[in-house]
Image (cartoon, rainbow, N blue to C red):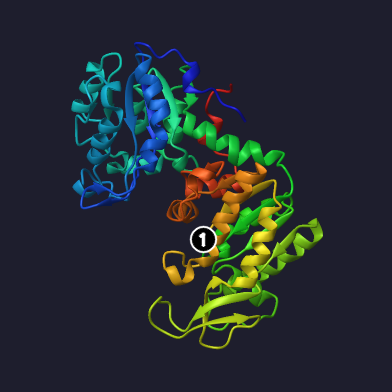
Amino acid sequence: MAKLGIDRVDVKGRRVLMRVDFNVPLDNGQITDDRRITAALPSIESVLKRGGRLILMSHMGRPEGTGFEADFSLRPCAERLAALLGDISRNGVAFPSEDCVDAGAAAAVNRLADGECLMLENLRFHKAEKKGDEAFAKKLAAYGDVYCNNAFGTCHRPDASMVAVPRAMTGKPRVCGSLVAREIQYLSDALTNPRRPFVVILGGAKVSDKLPTIEHLVTRADTILIGGAMAYTFLKAQGASIGASRCEEDKLADATRMLALAADQGCNLMLPTDHMCSTKFSETDGEHKTFAGDIADGFMGLDIGPDTIGRYTKAILEAGTVVWNGPMGVFEWPLFATGTRQLAEAVARVTQERSAISIVGGGDSAAAAEKFGVADQLSHVSTGGGASLEMLSGAEFESVNLLDDA
């Protein structure tokens, strides 16, 4: 699945149209987490240092798609990127227009000199972006001599900038950035022949979100550890009493099928045996209690209990490869963060002490790894929540398939 990387393309004097994922969180116009920007820096710097003329495009949030909306402007991202690049970009990061395909944007692209960079305004100010519109894509494609996909977080989407633009640039180099190459290396290639034992940690709220992933990985993993609210659908399917815990009643049959498939494949699918519970979905209100086995009426599980933490930690510390997607509980609240924190620390420990390959699948898991200070001790932390989950499910991405093979 290896794709040609931007580093192997001569970019001097050529306009490089790079799709990035700068959909970062903002608070009153201030970026609160710039990880998606810093993750894209290696390929951005590579193009600029080699004399390329760089045009960056991204989306931000969910605007109406009927024109400029200040709350969803990419200007803060352009300013942050300029600060991160320093002298690498000769004239900072230009931000020429409130529309990515108007005359002002096109003129700015034509004025670019070698080693200069500009950022287009939010692609989703046009409904055509999410629709994958070919006419819109051709306007964007006209900007570039080289197309570079460096936006793993949107690789699973058929948006115009992800699919229709590279299609429109057939015959020109269509390559991947280092961020996408690294994601492919870990989320796809590394799982083709994992170092064993292969342990998967799956958590989060909904079984429905993880069913394709479970179905794909249950035939490959040695052990799957289930936590989070999704565990209660599995436990109820086994006949356990789960109190007021969240349960997807319409997924009970699917949970039963997954349990049977795991048994058939020789995969040890482990479920929580004790639970940190509360009578209210709150850290401060309600009665708190730990239950072993069945959960009493009126109580809901909000974290895995100490016995489960011990069992899961033992499995992790014996692993050769660990994939983690989804928290074990409401880790944002200290009272219910213990399960997620201790498992995160176990994943870091097995990575450092046994040289295990550890892959964190973005989203809440990545946030938890950062929160508990282990992100830099893991092999790979994905930048794309939805995209990583789909790739772990074995899905193929048209946006990636369109790129040139290495």
Q: Is residue 392 above or below residue 403?
A: below
Residue at far front of view = 353
Name the quarter where the C terminus is drawn: top right
| Number of numbered tags placed on the structure image | 1
Q: Name which residue lies at 70% across and 69% down.
A: 256
The reply to whether residue 319 is visible in this rendering is yes
Q: Nearer the viewer, residue 104 or 315?
A: 315
Name the quarter where the N terminus is drawn: top right
Side of 353 relative to 341 (left or right) = right
Q: Label 1: how many residues lie within 10 Å, few (<14), some (14-19) or many (20+)?
A: many
Q: Is residue 159 above or below residue 404?
A: below
Identity, as a three-letter code, of the amino acid under mark 1: Arg
Q: Name which residue lies at 42% across and 84% down.
A: 286
What residue is shown with label 1? 341
Q: Name which residue lies at 23% across and 25% down.
A: 92
The reply to whether residue 394 is visible in this rendering is no
**Spot occupied by residue 312 in the image (x, y as percentages of width and height):** 65, 62
Q: Name which residue lies at 39% across and 17% down.
A: 145
| Element carrying mark 1 | helix
Q: Nearer the viewer, residue 373 or 87?
A: 373
Q: Nearer the viewer, residue 36 or 290?
A: 290
**Spot occupied by residue 40 in the image (x, y as percentages of width and height):** 40, 33
Side of 366 relative to 98 (left or right) = right
- What is the quadrant of residue 21 in the picture? top left
- What is the quadrant of residue 265 in the picture? bottom right
